[in-house]
Image (cartoon, rainbow, N blue to C red):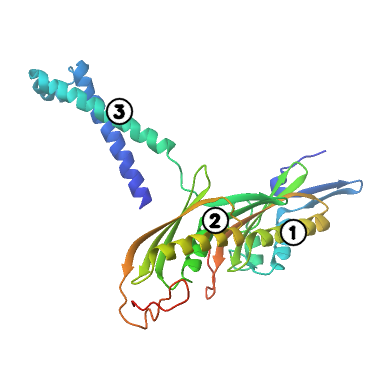
Amino acid sequence: MRKESRENTGANNEKELGETKIHNDVIATIAGIALAEVKGISSPSGGFVEGITGIIGRKYCEKGIKVEFAEDSIILEIPVIVEYGVRIPETALEIQKKIKERVERLTGNNVKSVNICVQGIKLPGDSKKEG
Amino acid sequence: MKFLTALFKLIYTFAALIIGLVLASLLIASLTEKKYIYDLVDFVFANRVVRLYSGFSGLFLASSAVFVLLGGFFAKKPVRSIAYNNPEGEVTVSIKTIQDLIEKTAMEFREIKNISPAVKKDKKGIIISLKTHVWEGANIPITAQQLQKVVKERAFAILGLDNISSVEVNISKIIPRKNTKENPEIFDNNGESNDEL
């Protein structure tokens, strides 16, 4: 069995017919699409698609979704900008549940934790405000 | 600017350390053979009082440099975010988010002209400091109390921060009312117009 760095190759599902690799970018894209469905949230980098690309190897809580592997499960770090008035505890939990369910369902991998990083608050009249 | 400040501190520290050690060494006469300090050494050694002063000054500078170095090494780094856990993982809220929310909340008070929030953290919890400019005629104790209450409530309700140990309000300036358009009316906390204005 050949083992590769999971940080770069993503999830690795080995079956009898061969192995299936899922790149980290794919997992980040799935998480980004799920995130876009939550109201009152926007991506720090403008669009979710732009925020998803070029995400690997950046510092914690920078722009872009970060995907890490801990043993056989995935840890996701999701930076967000919240709109003014949004209750962060409830919204963060909603994001976490939605992303966890989506990633587990579409990739077949276990999600250990979804960490939310609130980088800024979008005030009324602001086009974008980041922390 | 922070980089320059750090650079100056570093240069000062090393300069003080070197000067201090050289001066201290004069006390024990360990560098008397070095040519470049012959004149200085002659002068210092010619007078016992000067030698003692030089030696103790050197010891003071050297020890202060060590303290500066140790102080910089062990100094608390500024907090950039506050984090808490929920069943699905961790939620991190940046300090900028907290400051923006506090600013927005404070600006709902008619008595407040502007506000500069600062967020710190210690063993007891989160400390929010609010440097505030209020309009002339504002009832400061009541405004401050209301502000503290609302900020604490919003921080819990919106941000989920339940460990705020204190909300410090520092009224640093009273802004005189120039015209009625800028500050048309200030109400007291019973909702009644303040006649003093």
In the image, taking residue B66 as reference, residue B191 lies left or right, namely right
Indicate the chain on which mark 2 is placed.
B
Q: Quadrant of residue A29?
A: bottom right
Badge 1 local density, few (<14 within 10 Å), some, or many (20+)? many
Location of mark 1 (residue): A99
The CA span between labels 2 and 1 is: 21 Å
The residue lying toward the viewer, choosing from A93 and A59, is A93
Query: Mark 2 = which residue?
Result: B94
Instruction: Name the residue type under label 1.
Output: Ile
Quadrant in which residue B173 is drawn: bottom left
SS at badge 2: strand
B121 or A17: which is nearer to us? B121
Callout in the foreground (2, 1)? 2
Look at the numbered disc 3 and give the secondary structure of its residue.
helix
Whether labels 2 and 1 belong to a single chain: the reply is no
- What residue is at 26 percent from the left and 33 percent from the top? B16
Q: Are marks 3 and 2 on the same chain?
A: yes
A65 versus B139 height, above or below: above
Kind of residue at badge 2: Ser
Residue on which the image places disc 3: B63
Which image quarter is the N terminus of chain A in? top right
Label 1 chain ID: A
Q: Is residue B43 left or right of residue A73?
A: left
- Name the residue nearer the viewer: B53 or B137: B137
From this viewpoint, is residue B67 visible?
yes
Amino acid under disc 3: Ser
Q: Position of residue B52 (x, y in %)?
A: 16, 21
Nearer to us in this view, B121 or A92: B121
